[in-house]
Image: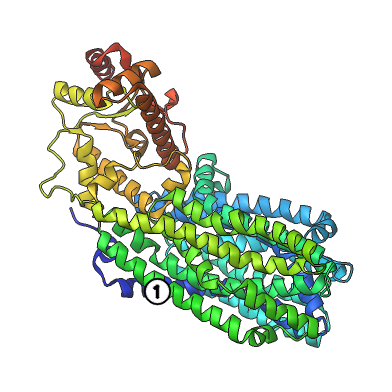
C-alpha cells in the first residue's frame, strides 16, 4: 500500500515551499474579501459625507457580521463536507451537500433580509447610530440588506468552489466583484451624487457580479452534478455541515458581540466627551477595517499551514510540526510587528486614506491607532494559536485561544474600564475603551503561552509508532461481512475474535487501524486513539478538524478494501455505515446494562468503580459523536442494525446468537 501523492508531499516536501503554496491563495482570497468592506469607507470618507458617512456605515457592520456568521457556517461546513466526500469518493453525498447548502442559505438569507428591512431603524439605533447619522445608516443598510440573498449565496458558493478544487475560479469571482465595487463607488458617489446610497449600490452590484460568476461554475463543476433532487434539504447532511462550520459561526458571533459592546459604549461615553458619539464610532469603523486586513494576512498564513500541521501531527512527525510552527510564528510576528510600527509611528498616513476630519477627529483617530492597536502583534499570535490547535484536533485549547482575548477579556473590560474612568474624570470614559484592547492582549498572551509551551514540551515524550511493514489484508473468500458496533464494556473485541475463530474467517480490530496508518502515512497510535482522545466536551468540533477527518477517510478506505477482499469480522469505526451500500453485510450492535459494563471495565483494566463509570460514559459519548459525525444517524438506534444483542448474556451466548442470525 502506498501513501497518496498529496499526503506524501505534506510529510516530505520542504516546509517553506509547502507553506507558500498553501498560504498565498488563502491570503489573497481573504484580502479580496476585505476589499468589499474597506473600499466603501475610503470613498465615503473622502466625499462630502466625511466621517459621519463612515460612522453611518460602521453601525451596520455588526449586522453584516451576523449574516456572515450564517453564510460562513454553511459555506465552511459544506466545503469541509465536500472535501470529506472527495476523500471517500462519495459523489452522491457531494451533490446533496451542495444543493442542501444552497437551499438552506437561500431560506436563511430571505428571513434575515425580511427581519432587517422591517427592523432597520431600531437595529441601527441599537448598534450606535446617532441623530446625525441615523438617516444615512438606514439608507445604506436598507440597500445592503435587500441584497442579502446574493451576498450570502456568494459566500457559500465561493467556499464550495474552492473545496471542489477550483480556488483560482473562486478568487476571480471575488476579485471581479471587488473591482466592480471600486469602479462604481466613485461613479455613484462623486459623479452621480448619490451619496451613501451610491456606496451601498456599488457594493450590492459588486456582490451580484461575483454571485453570477459563481453560479456559472455550478453548471459544470469538477466532482459533482446537480439535479433537482440535490436542492431538497437532506437533514443528515445538513446536521454534519452545520457541525463542521460551527467553529466559524462562533468566531463570527464573537465579532458581533465585540462590535455591539464597542458601538454601544462608544456612543454612550462619546456623548459625554468632547468628541461626541459620531467621531468615536467613525474612527472605530476605520480601525476595524484596517485591523481586519492585518488579521486576514495572518489568518491566511496560518490556514496555509493547517494541512501541514494536521497531517504531520497525525503522522507522528513532530519535528516537522515544530518546524512549521516556528515558520508560521515568525511570519505572524513579522506581520504583527510591521503593522504595529505603522500604527505607532505614522497613524496619520493610514487615517488619511479614509479622508480628513477636524482636529478632534484626528486627535481621537491617532489615539485609537496608538493605544487600541498597540499590541497588534500579540493579537495576531492569539489568532494564530487558535487555528494551530484546531489544525491538530486540540479543540478545547482552540476554543480557549479563540475566546480568551475578545470574549473573556476584552468584552468585560470594554464595559468596566469606561465606567471606572468616567467616574474618575468626566469625559474620559471613551478613552477607557481604547485601553481595554492592550490589557486584554496582555492577559490573552499569558493564557496562550500557558497553552502552547506545555503542549510543545509534552511532545518531547511522544513516541512515534509506525504501522507494521508486514501488515496485509488477509486472504479470505466470498461471503458475509459482519460488522460489530458496541457500547463500551460489552467485550466487543473478544466477542468478534471468538466469532471469527468459530467461522474461520479474518478478524479486524487494531489490524484495521494499522492498515489505515500504512495506507495514509498517519501514525498507528493516533488512529487507534481517535475516540480516546476525543474531549469530554466539543466532540463535534474535535471531529471536524482536518487531521481527524484525514484519519476518518483513511479508515473508511481500508474498511472498504477489507470488505472487497471477502468475508470477515470488523469491529468498530462505524463499519456498518461505511459499508451501507454493500448487500452482504450483517450489522451487529452489542449493548448491556450500565452496571454490567462498569463491572467488566473494572475486571479488564483494574479501574475503580468511579473511574470505570467515567470511562464508560466518555467512550460511549465519543463513539456516538464519531458515528453521528460521519453518518448523521444516531449511534445505537436499533433501526440501523440487523441484530442487537445484550452482551450480559455472556460471550459464548452472544457468539451463538450472531451465528444463528448469519445462518438465517
- Residue shown at the point (32%, 74%) measured from the top left: 16
Label 1: element kind: helix
Q: Which residue is mark 1?
A: 330
The residue lying toward the viewer, choosing from 359 and 658, is: 359
Identify the residue at the far front of this view.
Answer: 424
Compared across the picture, whether 103 is left or right of 555 comes to right
Q: Is residue 614 shown above or below 147?
A: above
| Percent coordinates x, y for residue 162 in the rendering | 47, 64
Compared across the picture, whether 231 is left or right of 574 comes to right
| Percent coordinates x, y for residue 450 in the rendering | 43, 56
| Percent coordinates x, y for residue 39 in the rendering | 67, 78
The residue lying toward the viewer, choosing from 321 and 482, is: 321
- Residue shown at the point (54%, 45%) measured from the top left: 238
Q: Is residue 498 shown above or below 306?
A: above
Q: Quadrant of the C terminus?
A: top left
Residue 616 visible in the snapshot: yes
Dividing the picture into quarters, in which one does residue 259 lie?
Answer: bottom right
Q: Dot 1: within a 10 Å radius of its alpha carbon, few (fewer than 14), some, or many (20 or more) residues?
A: few
- Residue shown at the point (36%, 72%) measured from the top left: 327
| Percent coordinates x, y for residue 398 in the rendering | 46, 54
Residue 139 visible in the snapshot: no
Q: Is residue 7 shown above or below 25?
A: above
Amino acid at each position: 500500500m502506498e501513501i497518496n501523492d498529496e499526503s506524501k508531499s505534506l510529510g516530505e516536501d520542504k516546509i517553506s515551499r509547502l507553506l507558500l503554496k498553501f498560504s498565498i491563495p488563502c491570503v489573497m482570497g481573504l484580502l479580496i474579501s476585505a476589499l468589499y468592506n474597506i473600499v466603501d469607507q475610503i470613498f465615503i470618507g473622502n466625499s462630502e459625507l466625511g466621517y459621519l458617512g463612515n460612522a453611518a456605515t460602521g453601525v451596520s457592520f455588526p449586522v453584516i457580521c451576523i449574516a456572515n456568521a450564517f453564510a460562513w457556517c454553511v459555506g465552511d461546513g459544506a466545503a469541509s463536507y465536500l472535501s470529506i466526500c472527495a476523500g471517500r469518493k462519495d459523489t452522491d453525498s457531494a451533490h446533496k451537500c451542495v444543493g442542501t447548502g444552497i437551499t438552506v442559505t437561500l431560506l436563511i438569507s430571505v428571513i434575515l433580509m425580511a427581519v432587517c428591512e422591517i427592523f432597520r431603524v431600531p437595529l441601527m439605533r441599537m448598534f450606535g447610530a446617532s441623530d446625525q447619522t441615523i438617516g444615512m445608516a438606514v439608507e445604506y443598510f436598507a440597500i445592503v440588506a435587500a441584497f442579502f440573498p446574493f451576498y450570502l449565496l456568494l459566500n457559500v458558493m465561493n467556499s464550495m468552489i474552492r473545496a471542489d478544487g477550483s480556488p483560482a475560479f473562486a478568487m476571480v469571482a471575488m476579485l471581479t466583484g471587488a473591482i466592480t465595487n471600486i469602479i462604481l463607488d466613485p461613479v455613484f458617489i462623486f459623479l452621480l451624487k448619490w451619496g451613501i446610497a451610491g456606496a451601498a449600490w456599488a457594493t450590492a452590484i459588486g456582490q451580484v457580479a461575483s454571485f453570477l460568476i459563481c453560479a456559472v461554475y455550478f453548471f459544470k463543476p469538477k466532482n459533482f452534478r446537480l439535479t433537482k433532487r440535490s436542492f431538497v434539504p437532506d437533514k443528515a447532511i445538513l446536521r454534519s455541515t452545520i457541525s463542521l462550520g460551527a467553529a466559524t459561526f462562533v468566531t463570527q458571533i464573537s465579532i458581533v458581540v465585540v462590535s455591539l459592546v464597542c458601538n454601544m459604549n462608544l456612543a454612550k461615553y462619546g456623548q459625554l466627551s468632547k468628541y461626541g458619539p459620531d467621531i468615536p464610532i467613525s474612527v472605530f469603523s476605520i480601525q476595524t477595517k484596517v485591523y481586519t486586513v492585518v488579521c486576514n494576512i495572518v489568518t491566511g498564513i496560518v490556514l496555509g499551514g493547517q494541512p501541514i500541521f494536521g497531517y504531520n501531527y497525525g503522522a507522528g512527525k513532530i519535528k516537522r510540526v515544530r518546524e512549521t510552527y516556528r515558520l508560521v510564528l515568525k511570519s505572524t510576528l513579522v506581520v504583527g510587528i510591521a503593522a504595529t510600527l505603522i500604527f505607532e509611528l505614522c497613524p496619520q498616513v493610514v487615517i488619511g486614506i479614509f479622508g480628513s476630519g477636524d482636529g478632534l477627529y484626528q486627535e481621537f483617530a491617532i489615539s485609537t491607532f496608538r493605544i487600541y492597536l498597540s499590541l497588534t502583534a500579540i493579537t495576531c499570535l492569539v489568532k494564530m494559536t487558535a487555528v494551530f490547535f484546531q489544525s491538530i484536533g486540540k479543540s478545547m485549547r482552540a476554543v480557549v485561544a479563540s475566546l480568551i482575548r475578545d470574549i473573556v477579556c476584552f468584552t468585560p473590560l470594554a464595559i468596566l474600564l469606561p465606567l471606572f474612568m468616567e467616574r474618575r474624570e468626566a469625559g474620559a470614559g471613551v478613552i477607557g475603551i481604547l485601553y481595554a484592547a492592550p490589557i486584554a492582549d496582555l492577559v490573552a498572551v499569558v493564557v496562550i503561552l500557558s497553552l502552547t509551551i506545555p503542549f510543545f514540551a509534552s511532545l518531547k515524550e511522544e513516541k512515534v509508532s509506525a504501522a507494521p511493514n508486514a501488515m496485509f489484508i488477509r486472504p479470505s473468500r466470498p461471503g458475509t461481512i459482519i460488522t460489530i458496533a458496541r457500547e463500551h464494556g460489552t467485550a466487543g473485541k473478544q466477542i468478534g475474535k471468538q466469532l471469527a475463530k468459530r467461522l474461520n474467517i479474518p478478524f479486524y480490530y487494531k489490524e484495521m487501524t494499522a492498515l489505515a496508518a500504512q495506507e495514509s502515512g498517519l501514525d498507528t497510535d493516533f488512529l487507534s486513539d481517535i475516540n480516546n482522545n476525543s474531549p469530554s466536551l466539543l466532540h463535534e468540533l474535535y471531529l471536524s478538524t482536518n487531521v481527524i477527518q484525514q484519519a476518518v477517510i483513511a479508515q473508511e478506505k481500508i474498511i472498504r478494501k477489507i470488505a472487497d477482499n471477502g468475508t470477515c469480522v470488523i469491529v468498530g469505526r462505524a463499519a456498518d455505515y461505511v459499508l451501507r451500500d454493500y448487500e452482504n453485510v450483517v450489522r451487529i450492535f452489542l449493548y448491556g446494562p450500565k452496571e454490567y459494563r462498569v463491572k467488566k471495565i473494572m475486571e479488564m483494566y483494574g479501574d475503580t468503580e468511579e473511574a470505570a463509570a467515567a470511562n464508560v460514559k466518555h467512550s460511549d459519548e465519543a463513539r456516538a459523536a464519531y458515528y453521528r459525525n460521519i453518518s448523521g444517524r444516531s449511534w445505537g438506534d436499533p433501526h440501523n442494525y440487523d441484530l442487537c444483542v445484550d452482551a450480559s448474556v455472556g460471550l459464548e451466548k452472544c457468539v451463538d446468537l450472531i451465528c444463528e442470525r448469519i445462518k438465517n
